[in-house]
Amino acid sequence: MRPWLAGDPRRPARPVLAAAVRLSLRTLAQDAPGRSVEVRVPPFAAVQCVEGPRHTRGTPPNVVETDPLTWLELATGAVTWAQALADGRISASGSRADLSAHLPLLRL
């Protein structure tokens, strides 16, 4: 996984990638408990996190969506929230959709 995050074009096996995304999203949900922001990393997982008004129906008002590579780069500190947002690698909508205070989850 580490070489891929550093730019190696060889993508990890799908089960390995899926596990890394799911576990890191689960860590985010534990570190920032709540249900006001939905974080989506298709096709592997989505979680709700961050304290605030709870969302229960339809499209959540605060949504973050990104690809697996960008998510894992954010989670490990390989890229900052501001960098990924400026590069258009994150779709973030809603007043609570800024996760910069919660990232990185760990540093490699």
Image: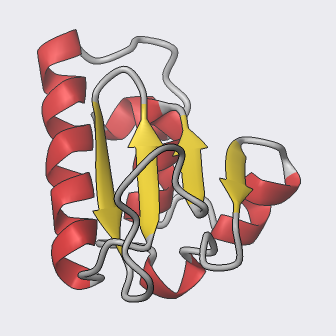
Identify which residue, 28 or 61, lies in the foreground: 61
Toward the right, the furthest residue is 86
* Rendering coords of residue 5 (x, y %): 45, 39
Q: Residue at x 16, y 76 (%)?
A: 30
Residue 9 pos. (x, y %): 51, 14
> With 65 as the anchor, is 95 left or right in this view?
right
Q: Is the image coloured rainbow, by chain, by secondary structure, or in one colour? A: secondary structure
- The quarter of the picture where residue 38 lies is bottom left
The residue positioned 55% from the left and 31% from the top of the image is: 7
Q: How many marks?
A: 0
Q: Is residue 108 visible?
A: no
> Where 23 falls versus 29 (above or below)?
above
* Residue 79 image position (x, y, % from top left): 61, 59
Q: Which is nearer the eye, 102 or 39? A: 39
Residue farthest toward the front in the current orientation of the protein: 57
Q: Residue at x 38, y 33 (%)?
A: 3
Q: Residue 1: which quarter of the image?
A: top left
* Residue in the foreground of this view, choosing between 71 and 45: 45
- Visible residue check, residue 49: yes
Q: Is residue 89 above or below residue 62?
A: above
Classify residue 107 as left or right of residue 73: left
Quick check: 62 above or below 96?
above
Q: For the C terminus, which image quadrant?
A: bottom left
Residues 93 and 4: in front is: 93
Residue 31 location in percent, x, y?
Answer: 23, 82
Q: Quadrant of residue 54?
A: bottom left
Q: Residue at x 28, y 27 (%)?
A: 44
